[in-house]
Image (cartoon, helix red, strand yellow):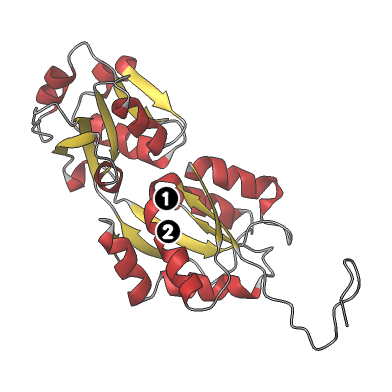
């Protein structure tokens, strides 16, 4: 018997589970996409992932993306935006896990052979000179906040702040360096690794900025039965190994 379009499916037909929606920090593009592919190969619907600045995504959740017909998981590039959601009761208690770390680096064009001692603020200033410095917006975006903290600790933020080109997220900052719009940029080590058009000119000392951490959480409004399974996969040894391949530091 032919099944007409719009008619009810037979009672024996199983409705496939819907794919969970994940909101994730822009720096996770390649790694999280690989993790979603790995999850799909296990027979699950491939998660739908939306990448942007953690700040923009957190605000989206606050505006209603965490409702029952919205996002299921959120992965931030810092703890502050996750704290903001927790304070508003938008996360499921007991599902928050900080599972990845990263490093902060100064990048330049791949053709530029300069190496900068990132322990010395004056050398950073000298390297940038009259040029521009691309950064994710320090007012709200985690990568920018980490960058400002490091430059402040090194005593050169007041000098370099006027030279900063503020980007909407860390990948937008990377793109400015790739296109030659800024000779230098501050991004994560994993972002630099993802681009053949830039090279690392220097690595910021670990103690110059707060530890870079990536917490994942299930959002309070999620009703998708696939969401918790994917969250657990991400923080498992197998899941973390995928991110390690892209340069992240499993925690």
Residue at the image position 10 percent from the left and 35 percent from the top:
119
State the SS at label 2. Answer: helix
* Cα–Cα gap, marks 2 and 1: 6 Å
Specify the quadrant of the image occupied by residue 118: top left
- Does 177 sit above or below residue 189? above
Q: In the depicted view, which residue is nearer to us: 150 or 222?
A: 222
User: For residue 238, what is the image quadrant?
Assistant: bottom left
| Residue 226 spot, x, y in % from top left | 60, 73
- What residue is disc 1 on? 29
Q: Residue 128 appears at what percent x and percent y?
A: 18, 19
Residue at x 36%, y 40% (from the top left corner) = 143
- The residue under label 2 is 32
Spot the residue most to the front: 1
95 sits left or right of 193 in the view: right
Is residue 193 shown left or right of residue 36?
left
Residue 97: tell me if it is visible.
no
Q: Are marks 2 and 1 in contact (CB under 8 Å)?
A: yes
Residue at image location 33% in from the left, 76% down from the top: 237
């Amino acid at each position: 018997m032919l099944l007409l379009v719009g008619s009810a499916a037979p009672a024996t037909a199983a409705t496939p589970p819907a794919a969970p929606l994940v909101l994730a920090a822009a720096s996770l593009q390649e790694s999280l996409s690989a993790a979603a592919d790995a999850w799909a190969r296990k027979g699950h619907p491939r998660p739908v992932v939306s990448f942007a600045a953690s700040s923009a995504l957190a605000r989206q959740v606050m505006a209603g993306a965490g409702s029952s017909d919205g996002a299921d998981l959120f992965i931030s590039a810092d703890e502050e935006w996750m704290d903001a959601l927790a304070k508003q009761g938008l996360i499921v208690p007991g599902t928050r896990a900080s599972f990845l770390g990263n490093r902060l680096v100064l990048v330049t064009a791949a053709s530029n052979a300069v190496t900068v001692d990132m322990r010395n603020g004056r050398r950073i200033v000298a390297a940038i000179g009259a040029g521009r410095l691309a950064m994710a917006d320090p007012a709200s975006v985690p990568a920018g906040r980490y960058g400002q903290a490091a430059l402040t600790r090194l005593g050169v933020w007041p000098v370099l702040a006027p030279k900063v080109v503020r980007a909407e997220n860390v990948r937008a900052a990377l793109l400015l360096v790739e296109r030659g719009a800024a000779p230098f940029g501050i991004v994560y080590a994993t972002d630099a690794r993802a681009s053949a058009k830039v090279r690392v000119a220097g690595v910021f000392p670990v103690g110059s900025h707060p530890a870079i951490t990536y917490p994942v959480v299930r959002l309070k409004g999620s009703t998708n039965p696939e969401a918790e399974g994917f969250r657990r996969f991400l923080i498992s040894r197998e899941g973390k190994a995928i991110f390690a391949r892209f340069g992240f530091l499993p925690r």
